[in-house]
Amino acid sequence: MTQQLVMTPQLQQAIKLLQLSRLELTEIVQEEMMENPLLEEQSESEVEASVKESSGPTVDDQTETGRDESEQITDKKAGEDEIDWERYLENYQHLGPTAGAAVRPDSDDLPGLDQTLTRSATLFEHLIWQVRLSSFTDAEIEAATFIIGNLDDDGYFKVPGNDGDPLIACAHATGVSLTESEQALRKVQSLDPAGIASRDLRECLLIQARQIGEDDTLVGEIIRNHLPRVEARNARDIAKELDVCLQAVIEAIQIIQEMEPRPGRQYTGAEPQYITPDVYVYKIGDKLVTVVNDDGLSKLRVSGAYRSLLTNGEGGEAKDYIRERLRSAQFLIRSIHQRQRTIHKVTESIVRFQREFFEKGVSFLRPLILRDVAEDIGMHESTVSRVTSNKYLHCSQGIHELKFFFNSAIGSTSGDGIASQAVKSRIENLVAGEDLEKPLSDKKIVDLLRGEGIEIARRTVAKYRDHLGILPSSKRKRLY
């Protein structure tokens, strides 16, 4: 005889649902509705009607009712024939929607149908359309199609697996002569957007300089021979070597900085991913109220079309199948209810720990670890970790992932730890207010933070600065 911990399929499903994002949960629900004929979604009109008819019970009451009924069903040791499935289905139809009684109201602010169905043209489509309207020969069209098909996300002409001149690869692949391939490349580079199909940054900037008439000026000279010094902001060295005044070099560099180094950026094809918060935190009076966002989640119920099959005395195999599907549907609905309740419970604990953040801002964020929340609500750390993964919170301070509120502690002279996110925010504010001619070095930032009572090492400041996407002080220096 041995003892072992066994995870049932139902428990595995509950854990899986707990760590899913809203989008992933919606996809899982749609898959279950395709596989389980007993599951169906209530329409908005049915949801509104059920909310109006059920004036007494709340969502939690409905959830507890469904849970009590399920426990009575699963805990019975009698045979399956003793279960009154007909009565269960009949009573279940009166329960409210799965994800809560929230109904999405009609709003004029919602996007129209045409805005949800359209998509922007890709870079390939945009360029091919211009090629068809231009005077390309048949051979040039063949080469241009190859060139456009081998543009990377930034709009540069690069053939995968080829380290040499991509024009040679184009000529070999298309059978077009190298001269015609080069002519096709020049014509493609004259298309919109400016600088497209370049083979490197220097060529990209020269094409744009040529289009604005700056190819043979100081701008073109700097692009051809002094790009590394432009990146290092050594305007004085450029002026000294070219024997021109510093102001002329600064004006030329300003023109270069207005050019687009990645011309294909606006045609990457990556659609914006809009975040739908899983929970809202409102301040009503002196209280912070947590509300789980049920809008957009499917309102599931058990289909009433199968009641006649259960009441019919014939078809034993059909009844067994319906009972099995009924248990699966009922457990899925319970798991979604449990997921919403757990998110609410974890968020309320976070709000209690981070109350000053919700009232005053990120500078008052406290150090917090998963164990603190787990001990506060009586759950395991792994459960809290699953709940906070891919979940977002909306409050007066903006939209933040739930993981945002868990931070390591940075030492301070007062003895109380400071959240690492609060230190990052302070570094960002210091850099934003610095003198552009004399930017703050990492050592200077350390000294300023220690003056505020924050004990931090220089390498930690450098790491946080990299996380924030802030360049080193040598590259932040501005002379113009």
Image (cartoon, rainbow, N blue to C red):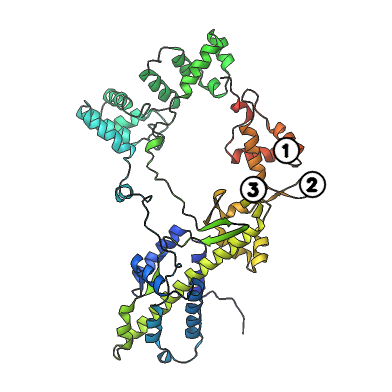
* Image position, residue 350 (x, y; %): 62, 58
Q: Nearer the viewer, mark 1 or mark 3?
A: 3
Labels 1 & 2 near each other (Cβ < 8 A): no
* Residue at x-position 22% and y-position 30%: 133
Q: Nearer the viewer, residue 217 or 98?
A: 98
Q: Amino acid at mark 1?
A: Leu
Mark 2 residue element = loop
* Residue at x-position 49% and y-position 20%: 254
> Residue 414 bears which disc, if any?
2
> How far separated are the C-alphas under marks 1 and 2?
13 Å
Q: Residues within 10 Å of mark 1 (few under 14, many from 20)?
A: some
Q: Amino acid at mark 3?
A: Lys
Q: Nearer the viewer, residue 235 or 199?
A: 235
Q: Earlier in the sequence, mark 1 or mark 2?
A: 2
Mark 3 residue element = helix
Q: Amino acid at mark 2?
A: Ser
Q: Earlier in the sequence, mark 1 or mark 3?
A: 3
* Image position, residue 212 (x, y; %): 37, 18
* Image position, residue 223 (x, y; %): 46, 19
> How far separated are the C-alphas under marks 2 and 3?
20 Å
